[in-house]
Image (tube, helix red, strand yellow):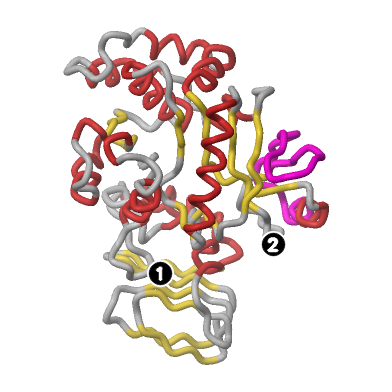
Amino acid sequence: MAGGVGSRFWPFSRNDRPKQFLDFFGTGRSLLQLTFDRFSQVVPVKNILVVTNHIYKDLILEQLPEISPDQVLLEPHRRNTAPCVAYAVSRIKALTDKANIIVAPSDHLIVKEGAFLDTLREGLEFIERNNVLLTLGIQPSRPETGYGYIQVAEGDGALRKVKTFTEKPNAELAQVFFETGEFYWNSGIFLWNLQAIDEAYRTLLPEMAHKFEEGRGKWNTPDEQKFVDEMYPACQNISIDYGIMEKASNVYVLCSDFGWTDLGTWGSLYEMSEKDEQRNVTLKCQAVYYDSENNVVALPEGKLVVVQGLDDYIVAESDNVLLICKKSDEQRIRQFVNDVNVMFEGEYN
């Protein structure tokens, strides 16, 4: 899934080049490319589908020259992740009646790739034998308020039945979740076989399933895009989490620990980055700090910034925008972006 705009990473992430296309760590590979590198070790390249907004088709093909244009599924509008997954499932179902499927965002960072690939293989073996919906749960390292949580049922082993899903909690509740040991972060990485996910859509999102079923005979043909362009705007705007995972009765979690981070915010990037003695993070640029700690500073390469007297701030510059805000208030960045769009008619989006 590579169609998001990543507004919480503004001003680095912009409409014309969202965060999944950016190289945050100077590795020479964007988050999308790192995701492709990771999954192509488990899945044949010809079986990888990228679902994205139509405006990013050229960027996808530029960054992933290994795939063909027909592996890029183009959404005419952003309608959240349930239609996105239904689109890919429809394409797969038109080709085969049996498949094991991995669904993953394109903007996650995974440090322990060997452990991650082992986890994927274990999960694939499980869903091949069982008609279940499987999510990867991450052992929490802190009481994080920016992630969703999964409560697991009692039992032994890494594979557990899911009791409840909880969206991003407040700080007090996150602390309780962290201390009980019953809760895992919801990675948003899902595994299931074709039969299990098809049944889930028919049962829990029947209207959406019907809309996509009307495309039978058009998938993987020249008529596909026209059908999608006409049908897609009428799809319910709902996530796969709300629409299916939180309602289904056959949901399991594979409890894992492979150095996962959802790079959704400046704070998550800060947590994963190398810090100096005052716990400042400097990305791309050069920085000199005086009486400053717990900051993340990201400016273009070749720039020097001198920071004095700041504690817990984000200082980020990209192109024609400079952002300075409290790291603890970063959830307001979406509001900043919306306000700027209204004030300047989208000039800085």
Residue 310 percent across, percent down from the top left: 55, 81
Q: Earlier in the sequence, mark 1 or mark 2?
A: 2
**What span is colored magenta in the figure?**
150-174
Q: Amino acid at mark 2?
A: Arg
Q: Report the disc number at residue 229.
A: none
Q: Is residue 264 left or right of residue 218?
A: right
At label 2, counting other C-alpha atoms closer than 10 Å, the crowd grade (few under 14, some 14-19, many 20 or more) is: few
What residue is at 71 percent from the left and 34 percent from the top? 162
Q: Nearer the viewer, residue 9 or 199?
A: 199
Q: Is residue 319 above or below residue 83?
A: below
Answer yes or no: is residue 55 visible.
yes
Residue 349 percent across, percent down from the top left: 33, 51
The residue that label 1 is drawn on is 316
What residue is at 34 percent from the left and 49 percent from the top? 36
C-alpha gap between disc 1 and disc 2: 25 Å
The residue that label 2 is drawn on is 142
Q: Is residue 227 left or right of residue 323?
A: left
Mark 2, secondary structure of its residue: loop
